[in-house]
Image (spheres, rainbow, N blue to C red):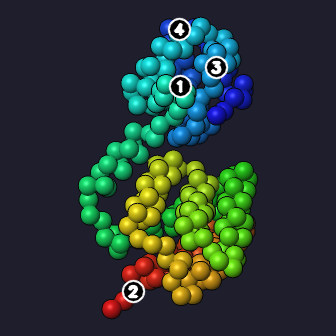
């Protein structure tokens, strides 16, 4: 739940409920609130926005009807997945995507993302990539790895790179792609020797991002994804 008063500045003139809805959407659009996050409690949010609770309730009901928020009675108000993400997930769920197609899409998404992250990623987002790497690296060194957790941390590392690239459509698309891969296959990290190779690949990707070397970041991402593809789809 985000209670930072700086996010919820007082409103300007206009129909109050519309202004409230616009302010909430501005906060969501700026990625200061993400899907699954809970809004501050009604009384607190109304005070921060310097508006009445009935006007706030009207705005929340409107955003709920539009699919931006979910009102869970007794639990609070939560940010939902963007409509584009839901539409993409529903569309892909009806298709039988082959692993080859899914890994092709990883290259389409993640190679330019690594390149852009190295070229234009800001310090905060690159620090988030490094934090994700550190957590994944430590988990990969465990004597008895938790493969489910490693798969989650591996996906998070790649998602942080895409976030550093700064393209929200890429972020949403990769998130859905990761969900499909996780449902459709066991992690490739269990393949003999794959964990060690993946660890080295991640080190190279991170080194390229630190060096702000877009070409090296793209090459390292390509090597990593193609190694994962070879582990997931062995040649006959």
The tag earlier along the polypeptide, 4 or 3, is: 3
Of badges 2 and 1, nearer the viewer stands: 1
Where disc 2 sits, the SS reads loop
The Cα atoms of the two marked residues, 1 and 3, are separated by 16 Å
Q: Residue placed at 45% from the left, 64% from the top?
A: 182
Q: Nearer the viewer, residue 119 or 79?
A: 79
Alpha-carbon neighbours of circle 4 within 10 Å: few (<14), some, or many (≥20)?
few
Q: Is any atom of residue 206 visible in this view? A: no
Image position, residue 23 (x, y; %): 57, 23
Check residue 74 in the rendering and tell me which mark sits there, or answer none. Answer: 1
Image position, residue 165 (x, y; %): 58, 55
The Cα atoms of the two marked residues, 2 and 3, are separated by 54 Å
Q: Which residue is mark 2?
A: 234
The tag earlier along the polypeptide, 2 or 1, is: 1
The tag earlier along the polypeptide, 1 or 3, is: 3
Where disc 4 sits, the SS reads helix
For the residues bearing labels 1 and 3, Cβ distance under 8 angstroms: no
Q: Is residue 27 above or below residue 198?
A: above
Q: Which residue is mark 4?
A: 54
Q: Residue placed at 41% from the left, 46% from the top?
A: 85
Q: Which residue is mark 3?
A: 45
The Cα atoms of the two marked residues, 2 and 1, are separated by 50 Å
The tag earlier along the polypeptide, 4 or 2, is: 4
Q: Is residue 201 above or below residue 161?
A: below
The Cα atoms of the two marked residues, 4 and 1, are separated by 18 Å
Res 136 → quadrant = bottom right
The Cα atoms of the two marked residues, 4 and 2, are separated by 60 Å
Alpha-carbon neighbours of circle 2 within 10 Å: few (<14), some, or many (≥20)?
few
Q: Residue placed at 39% from the left, 39% from the top?
A: 83
Image quarter in which the C terminus is found: bottom left
Where disc 1 sits, the SS reads loop
């Amino acid at each position: 739940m985000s209670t930072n008063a700086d996010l919820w500045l007082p409103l300007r003139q206009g129909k109050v409920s519309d202004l409230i809805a616009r302010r909430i959407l501005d906060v969501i659009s700026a990625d200061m609130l993400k899907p699954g996050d809970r809004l501050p409690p009604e009384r607190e949010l109304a005070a921060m926005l310097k508006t009445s609770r009935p006007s706030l309730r009207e705005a929340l009901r409107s955003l709920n009807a539009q699919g931006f928020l979910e009102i869970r009675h007794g639990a609070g108000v939560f940010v939902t997945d963007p409509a584009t993400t839901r539409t993409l997930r529903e569309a892909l769920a009806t298709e039988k995507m082959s692993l080859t197609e899914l890994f092709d899409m990883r290259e389409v998404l993640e190679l330019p993302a690594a390149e852009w992250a190295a070229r234009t990623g800001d310090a905060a987002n690159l620090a988030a990539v490094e934090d994700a790497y550190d957590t994944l690296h430590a988990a990969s060194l465990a004597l008895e790895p938790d493969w489910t957790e490693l798969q989650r941390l591996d996906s998070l590392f790649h998602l942080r790179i895409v976030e550093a690239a700064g393209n929200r459509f890429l972020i949403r698309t990769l998130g859905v792609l990761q969900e499909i891969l996780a449902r459709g296959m066991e992690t490739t990290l269990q393949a003999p020797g794959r964990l060690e190779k993946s660890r080295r690949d991640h080190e190279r990707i991170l080194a390229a991002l630190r060096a702000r070397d877009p070409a090296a970041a793209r090459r390292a991402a390509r090597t990593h994804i193609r190694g994962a593809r070879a582990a997931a789809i062995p040649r006959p």
